[in-house]
Amino acid sequence: MATHRRTRKASELKALNINLNKFIDAERMQRLTSIAILRRYWHDIVGTMMAERTEPVAIEPQHDGSLGLLIEVDHPVIADIIRRDLYNDIRLACFKRCKLHGLTKVWTKIQDGAGIREEKIVKHQRDVSYPELRLLAESLQDVEDKALRRQMFRAATAQLRNAQLKN
């Protein structure tokens, strides 16, 4: 007895024609935009070492009308450094880099795994042709020390790979 499976029509993605202002007021939308900009430039604001251990997660209005920045950190020592030493520097850098006005408070929350990892940029290297490698090996044949000759060959090969990229 054969059973027939009913197949349903594949769903299709449809464009969202929603005006977000109906759901989110302008002030909240501005804070969401600001946090997105902060996250984009966080490495420039706090430096690579700190950015990989911290991340801005929220901008909250304060009772006096100013703004506060919540930063998640991966270790209590980093939280202490921000509170004691970097508080003012972060506020000023947020203003200079992201034009974030009215930021008066910066506080931290410890969260395992916090941080914004910088994407590694892969440099494309050209392939070195066999004739180039052969010429290079021939030019190094007079070097008697085998280890030195090998290192010179590797260094020269790396130069050849990167030479065309600079041109």
Image (cartoon, helix red, strand yellow):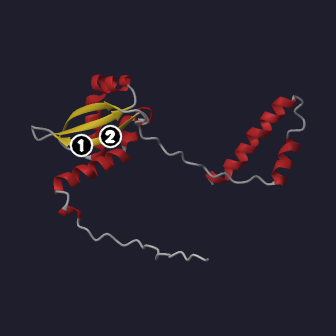
Q: Which of 156 and 68 is in front in this view?
A: 68
Q: Identify the element where label 2 is drawn.
A: strand
Q: Check disc 1 and report its element: helix, strand or loop.
A: strand
Q: Which residue is drawn at 27% across and 49% down?
A: 34
Q: In this view, does 25 lie to the left or right of 139?
A: left
Query: x, y percentage for residue 83?
Result: 28, 25
- Give above or below for 11 relative to 113: below
Q: Residue at 90% x, 35% y: name it.
A: 142
**Quarter of the image where the N terminus is located:** bottom right
| Dot 1 and dot 2 residues touching (CB under 8 Å) | yes
**Type of the residue with mark 2:** Pro
What residue is rendered at 87% in x and 33% in y?
143
The image shows residue 82 at horizontal and vertical percentages of 31, 27
| Residue at image mark 1 | 59
In the figure, residue 139 lies in which quadrant? top right
Q: Distance between the residues labelled 1 and 2?
A: 8 Å
Q: How crowded is mark 2: few (under 14 residues within 10 Å), some or many (20 or more)?
A: many
Q: Mark 2 points at which residue?
A: 56
Q: Where is residue 59 in the image (x, y as percent from the top left)?
A: 24, 43
The amino acid at mark 1 is: Ile
Q: In which quarter of the image is the C terminus?
A: bottom right
> Please, is residue 100 above or below residue 49 in the view?
below
In the image, taking residue 147 as reference, residue 25 lies left or right, namely: left
Q: How crowded is mark 1: few (under 14 residues within 10 Å), some or many (20 or more)?
A: many
Residue 102, label in figure: none
